[in-house]
């Protein structure tokens, strides 16, 4: 990802650590999924007029129907990731 950011002339901190972790987890090791999710998140960041991609932008991309793998077994609402730690 850093090589791609370098090629685009963007700093490495364009994606927050939380956003990067979600991208890696959701993509399941598929490079095309990483690329598509990152490009979608960058577009969302432009819409939000921010220079940093965070969970808000990642979630906006993941809400789109084509990111759902198996709609029959999915819950009604897609998973939403936050910076908050789960309550015990």
Image: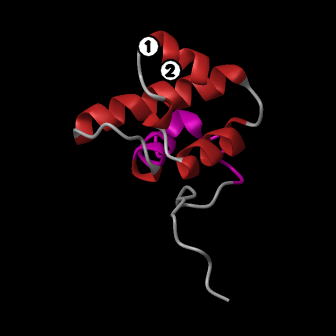
Q: Position of residue 34 (x, y in %)?
A: 63, 28
Q: Which stretch is magenta?
A: 57-73
**Circle 2 SS class:** helix
**Circle 1 SS class:** helix
Q: Position of residue 1 (x, y in %)?
A: 61, 24
Tally the marks.
2
Crowding at label 1, few (<14), some or many (≥20) Cα neighbours within 10 Å?
A: few
Q: Which residue is mark 2?
A: 5
62 sits left or right of 3 in the view: left
Which residue reaches farthest right? Answer: 29
Q: Please give the label number shown on residue 68.
A: none
Q: Residue at x 50, y 20 (%)?
A: 5
**Magenta span contains residue 71:** yes
* The C terminus: image quadrant: bottom right
Crowding at label 2, few (<14), some or many (≥20) Cα neighbours within 10 Å?
A: some
The reply to whether discs 2 and 1 touch (Cβ–Cβ < 8 Å) is yes
Q: Position of residue 63 (x, y in %)?
A: 47, 46
Q: Which residue is mark 1?
A: 8
Which residue reaches farthest bottom? Answer: 88
């Amino acid at each position: 990802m850093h090589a791609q950011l370098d090629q685009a002339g963007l700093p490495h901190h364009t994606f927050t650590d939380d956003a990067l972790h979600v991208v890696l987890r959701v993509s399941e090791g598929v490079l095309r999924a990483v690329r598509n999710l990152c490009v979608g998140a960058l577009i969302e960041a432009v819409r939000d007029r921010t220079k940093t991609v965070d969970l808000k932008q990642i979630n906006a991309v993941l809400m789109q129907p084509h990111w759902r793998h198996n709609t029959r077994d999915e819950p009604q609402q897609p998973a939403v990731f936050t910076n908050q730690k789960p309550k015990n």
